[in-house]
């Protein structure tokens, strides 16, 4: 269930600096929530891509929050230490590996993400089905390969929780195969035909849904 790998769905990740951030560019601080992040490759892929594409000032303004139910109780340590085994970094291009990872001196099978990326991540263990958000005023919520594990009612409830956790014009990014439940079409506008990138429609935000 926690299957993940570095640079999975790069097309979707590229939308963050390519589409989402330019739409909210007047803001100095950008709040991103990666919901159901598994043990971290998705968060670090996003951070590496942002580091590669944004200027220093813009990158400084990125506040990234990440959460997972983590039934194994192991993700917090892995994410905070940024340690991945050699077989987990196969999909990392060699130039990126060289730039953002170092090999553990005592165990050459372990690669460690650079500290300046590690200290950007605020991770917490969290059950989306609790329907209690980890925060508010997110500019972007990323939820990839997670909603598919929920039934229809749970999907509606979780996406409503995302709606209430976004800024008035915040974005929700799901994977290529995951559309939000039709019931919520009045709450989100699909922004691109080939990607499941949605923008909150704030007119229905008169009262919390
Ligand atoms: C297939 S992985 C996807 C990881 C990553 N988002 C990606 O796309 O590579 C699904 C993740 O959803 C998490 N998950 C499942 N149910 C959850 C829940 N109720 N609340 C939070 N996370 C959950 C699992 O622990 C797992 O890490």
Image (cartoon, helix red, strand yellow):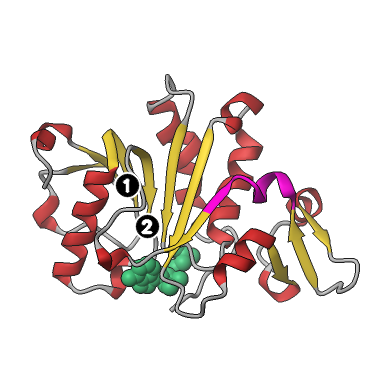
Label number found at residue 84: none
Q: Is mark 2 within 8 Å of ligand 1?
A: yes
**Image quarter (top left, top right, bottom left or bottom right) of the N terminus:** bottom left
Residue 188: give x, y in percent of width and height: 19, 43
Query: How many numbered marks does the figure carry?
Result: 2
User: Which residue is rendered at x = 86% and y = 72% of the image?
Assistant: 108
Residue farthest toward the right in the current orientation of the protein: 105
Depth check, front residue: 154 or 88? 154
Instruction: State the separation of the CA atoms marked 1 and 2.
Output: 8 Å
Give the class, few, some or many, for how many residues have Cα within 10 Å of label 2's Cα (few <14, many ≥20): some
* Mark 1 touches mark 2? (CB < 8 Å): yes
Label number found at residue 143: 2
Q: Left or right: where does residue 188 sit relative to residue 32?
A: left
User: Which residue is rendered at x = 30% and y = 74% of the image?
Assistant: 149
Q: Which residue is mark 1?
A: 172
Q: Left or right: where does residue 131 sit relative to residue 6?
A: left
Q: Tell me which label, 1 or 2, sits earlier in the chain.
A: 2
Locate residue 61: give its quadrant: top right
Helix, strand or loop under label 1 = strand
Q: Is residue 162 above or below residue 202?
A: below
Give the class, few, some or many, for how many residues have Cα within 10 Å of label 1's Cα (few <14, many ≥20): many
Residue 36: give x, y in percent of width and height: 42, 63
Q: Is residue 121 magenta?
A: yes
Q: Which residues are magenta?
A: 114-122
Helix, strand or loop under label 2 = loop
User: Which residue is rendered at x = 11% and y = 47% of the image?
Assistant: 209
Residue 89: give x, y in percent of width and height: 69, 67
């Amino acid at each position: 269930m926690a299957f993940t790998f570095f640079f999975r769905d790069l097309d979707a990740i590229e939308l963050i600096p390519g589409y989402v951030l330019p739409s909210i560019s007047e803001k100095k601080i950008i709040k991103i929530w990666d919901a159901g992040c598994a043990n971290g490759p998705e968060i670090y892929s996003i951070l590496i891509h942002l580091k590669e594409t944004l200027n220093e000032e813009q990158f400084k303004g990125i506040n990234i929050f990440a959460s997972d139910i983590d039934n194994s109780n192991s993700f917090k340590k892995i994410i905070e230490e940024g340690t991945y085994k050699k077989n987990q970094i196969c999909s990392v291009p060699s130039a990126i590996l060289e730039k953002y990872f170092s090999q553990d001196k005592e165990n050459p099978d372990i690669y460690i993400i650079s500290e300046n990326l590690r200290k950007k991540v605020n991770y917490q263990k969290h059950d989306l089905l609790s329907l209690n958000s980890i925060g508010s005023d997110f500019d972007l919520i990323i939820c990839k390969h997670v909603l598919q594990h929920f039934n229809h009612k749970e999907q509606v409830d979780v996406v409503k929780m995302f709606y209430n956790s976004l800024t008035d014009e915040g974005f929700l990014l799901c994977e290529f195969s995951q559309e939000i439940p039709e019931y919520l079409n009045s709450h989100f506008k699909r922004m691109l035909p080939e990607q499941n990138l949605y923008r909150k429609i704030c007119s229905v935000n008169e009262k919390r849904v």
